[in-house]
Image (tube, rainbow, N blue to C red):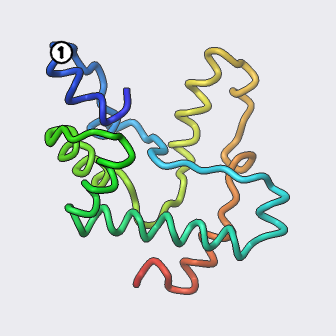
Amino acid sequence: MTADFIPRAKKLGLNVLVDLAESNIEYPFLAFSMMASTIRQNPTIVKAVIRSISEGIRLFQTDRNAAKAAIKEALRTNDAETLEFVATRSAKVLERKPFPTKGGIQTVLDELSEAEPAAKAGKFEDFVDLRALKELEQEGFFGR
């Protein structure tokens, strides 16, 4: 279940079996995808997208009011408990350097392989291109 539903589920008396944010399970809480041709042909745009995402994460981590305003608009809710929960959760699980991890991708592949056996053969490198992230890191972007 998504983070915004957890407070509602608890109010309804439902139990949360596993909270990935509180578990030791590696999971990609943030994921975005682009076609390989787009990444090759538009590296400037790819880096701009990553910069924007990273700046948004930093805002979530440093400005609670701005985070809650963004959540309120995205989720179309005024529920204070939900806004606080999602803001706290997002600041905790989202990394300013949005590097995917091998373990996180493997968790998803393992989950998918139950319905799609071909996913078992998938490898991190088949799905992830770190070039733009590494370039931004070398440029010192994440330290600003």
**Label 1 neighbour load within 10 Å: few <14, some 14-19, many 20+:** few
Which quarter shows the N terminus?
top left
Q: How many marks?
A: 1
Q: Position of residue 142 (x, y in %)?
A: 45, 77
Residue drawn at point x = 72 percent, y = 53 percent: 34
Compared with residue 38, is residue 32 higher up or lower down, i.e. above or below?
Answer: above
Which picture quadrant has residue 79?
A: top left
Disc 1, SS: loop
Q: Residue 68: x percent and y percent?
A: 25, 54
Judge from the rendering whether residue 66 lies leftward or rightward of residue 31; answer left or right.
left
For image coordinates 72% across by 18% down, the residue present is 117
As displayed, is residue 62 above or below residue 72?
below
- The residue where tag 1 is placed is 12
Q: Quadrant of residue 18?
A: top left
Residue in front for this viewpoint, 123 or 74? 74
- Would you place residue 127 above or below residue 65 in this image? above
Left or right: residue 48 versus residue 69 is right
Q: Where is residue 143 shown, x and y percent of the image? A: 41, 82
**Residue 49, percent across and down?**
60, 66
Residue 120 vs residue 132, the one in the foreground: 132
Q: Tell me if residue 133 comes above or below residue 128 in the rendering.
A: below
x 70%, y 41%: residue: 123
Q: Name which residue lies at 65% across and 15% down.
A: 115
Q: Which quarter shows the C terminus?
A: bottom left
Q: Can you tell which quarter of the image residue 77 is in?
A: top left
Q: Amino acid at mark 1?
A: Leu
